[in-house]
Amino acid sequence: MACAHRWLDLPDERLCRARPGYISSMGGARKAIWAQLPPLPAANLAELVRGYENAGLAGIWSPQLFGSPFSTLAAAAMVSDKLQLGTGIALAFTRSPLETACDALDLDIISNGRCVLGLGSSAESQITGSFGSTYGKPLAHMREVVAIIRAVVEHGHSGTLTTLGGDYHTLDLRRFRTLAAPVRDAIPIYLPAVFGKACAQAGEIVDGLLGHPLWNDHWIRNCVPVHLKTGLDRSGRDRQALALNLMVFTVINADKAEGIEDARATIAYYSQSAQYLPYFDAIGFGTEARAIQAAFAANDFIAMAVACSDAMVESIALVGPADMVRARMAQRSATADAITPVIPHFGLSHDKTAFYTNAIADNFYG
C-alpha cells in the first residue's frame, strides 16, 4: 500500500490532546491501535513517528508494494522507544528466507526487541511478473518460509544450523553464523489473509493475523472465527495464543456521499486481482469485482471506479460521520485484539489526505 498516510500541518501537541483511545462497545474492552507508515523524508517521518508514540499507539505497519519495509522501520526505531515496528507486509517470496530472517534480526537489534514480522504472499501476477520470483502453492510456500525464518532467528548465532528448506528453498547454512546473539530467540510473525485457508494457517503456525482491508462485517463475523479456530485446533492452541489485528479503510466525513466517492478508487484498486473473485462472490459483490477486473485488464482506471458500486464501498470501508464510523468500528472489531484504521489513499488530493488522516487521529488516537 503506497499511501501518503501522514498528519499534515498537525503539531505533536494536537496528538496529545486527541480524544482517548478507541474503546469497544462490545464489553468495554480497549483495542490496541496501530497505524500505517510509508517511506517519507527523514524530518516528516520522525515527526510522524513521535506523534504516533505520543498518542499512545501500540505500533506501526510499514507496507511493501515494491521496496523493502525494513529501512522505513529502522528509521522509525531511531526516533521511538515503545512502538511495535511491523512489516505490514513484507513479501515473503521475493527474497531468500535467510535475508528476511536477518533483516528482522537487525531490526530487532536496532529497536531493542520491537520487530513484528508480517509476511505476505501477495498476488501471483506481482510475484512472478514484477519480481520474477517463484510463487508456487502459496500456503505450502509460506509454511516453508516461516519455518526457515524461525530456525535462523533462534539458532543463527549458534553455528549449529545445517541444511534448511523444502520444495521452494534449499539453504546450506553449515558455515553461517550471525555476528551477535539475537535480542530474542523468537520474533512475532503475522500473516495477512483474505481467504479462509490463510486464516486457518495463521491460526496454526504464527503469532498474529492481519485482517485484509477488503474484509467486510459479514466475513469477519461469520467466516474468520470458524477458519481461525480450525487452525488453532490443529496446533492445540486457544484463541488467546494469536493476535487479530484488523486493517480497516476508515473514511470519516459528515458528507457520506462525498466519503463514498473518495473511497471508491481505493476499493476498486484492491479488487483488481482475479485471485479474489471467490471472496467477492462469497460477500455478494462478484459482479462488481468481475467488471473491475475486466476494466483493469483494459487499463481503464475510470471504468474500474465506475464498476465499484456505492454498496460495495460501504460494505468494505467504514464511511460516514464520526459517530457512525466509531459505532461501525466497534461492531466490526468486536472479536479483534487491535485495529489499524487507514485512509483510502488512491486519488486523494493533498488536502483530503490531511482531512481523512486527521479525522482518524481525532477519533481513534489518544
Image: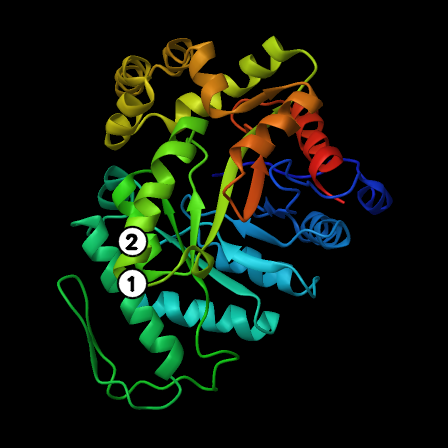
- Residue 356 in the image: above or below residue 142: above
Q: Is residue 17 shown to the viewer in this render?
A: yes
Viewer-side residue, 162 vs 126: 162
Q: Quadrant of residue 212?
A: top left
Residue under pointer 2 = 231
The percent position of residue 222, horizontal first and vertical second, equals: 37, 33
Name, please, the residue furthest toward the left.
167
- Residue 320 in the image: above or below residue 180: above
Residue under pointer 1 = 235
The percent position of residue 23, horizontal first and vertical second, equals: 68, 41
Q: Do callouts 2 and 1 mark residues in contact (Cβ within 8 Å)?
A: yes
Side of 343 where 298 appears, left or right:
left
Viewer-side residue, 205 vs 82: 205
Q: Residue at x 34, y 48 (%)?
A: 228
- Residue 23 in the image: above or below residue 291: below
The mark found on residue 168 in the picture is none
Q: Residue at x 79, y 36 (%)?
A: 9
Q: Residue at x 54, y 36 (%)?
A: 3
The percent position of residue 359, horizontal first and vertical second, equals: 71, 29
Side of 244 where 48 appears, left or right:
right
The percent position of residue 320, horizontal first and vertical second, equals: 63, 18
